[in-house]
């Protein structure tokens, strides 16, 4: 008897939950970089709101990818999804950082 699969629906949901947890952990690890840099140099000056916006942007992009990639069927579609999300992420990041589109 296979008790790990249950009715067959829990497997995909567990994968998505695990992937989202990985995105959140990765977001936390990425945010440690500017936090550590602030301890060693005056060149990096982030406020709490900077960390919050960065966390929302990074985690939001990662979670969007996980959810969209779970719905598409081919690796080509997943690569296109990743490329589009990366372009949107970088554009928003640049706009927030220096006002690129002003």
Image: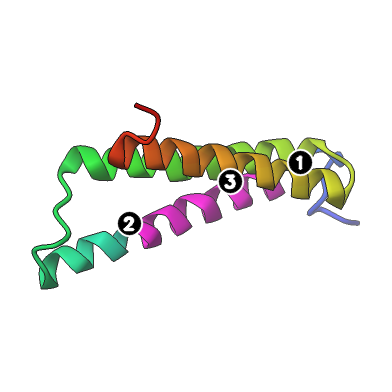
> In terms of image quadrants, where is residue 71?
top right
In the image, residue 4 above or below residue 91: below
Query: Label 2's element?
Result: helix
- Which range is magenta? 14-30
Vertical order, 84 against 32 (above or below) = above
Q: Main secondary structure of the magenta part?
A: helix
Pointers 1 and 3 in contact (CB under 8 A)? no
In the image, taking residue 78 as reference, residue 102 lies left or right, namely left
Q: Can residue 11 be seen here? A: no
Task: Determine the secondary structure under disc 3.
Answer: helix
Q: Earlier in the sequence, mark 3 or mark 2?
A: 2
Asked if residue 22 is among those painted magenta in the image, a careful observer would answer yes
State the residue position of label 1. 70
For the point 50% across and 41% down, which residue is it? Answer: 89
Q: Residue at x 61, y 52 (%)?
A: 18
Q: Residues within 10 Å of mark 3 (few under 14, many from 20)?
A: some
Residue extending farthest to the bottom is 40
Task: Please tell me the numbered disc located at residue 86.
Answer: 3
Left or right: residue 60 versus residue 12 is left
Q: Mark 1 or mark 3: name the one nearer the start of the chain.
A: 1
State the image coordinates of residue 64 (x, y, percent, origin top left).
60, 36
Q: Secondary structure at mark 1?
A: helix
Residue 53 pos. (x, y %): 32, 37
Task: Give the residue drawn at x 21%, y 37%.
Answer: 49
What residue is disc 2 on?
31
């Amino acid at each position: 008897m296979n008790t790990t699969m249950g009715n067959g629906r829990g497997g995909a949901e567990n994968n998505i939950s695990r992937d989202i947890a990985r995105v959140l952990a990765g977001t936390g690890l990425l945010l440690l970089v500017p936090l550590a840099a602030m301890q060693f140099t005056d060149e990096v000056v982030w406020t709490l709101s900077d960390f919050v916006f960065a966390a929302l942007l990074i985690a939001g992009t990662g979670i969007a990818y996980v959810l969209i990639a779970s719905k598409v069927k081919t690796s080509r579609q997943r690569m296109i999804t990743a490329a589009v999300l990366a372009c949107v992420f970088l554009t928003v990041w640049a706009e927030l950082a220096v006002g690129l589109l002003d």
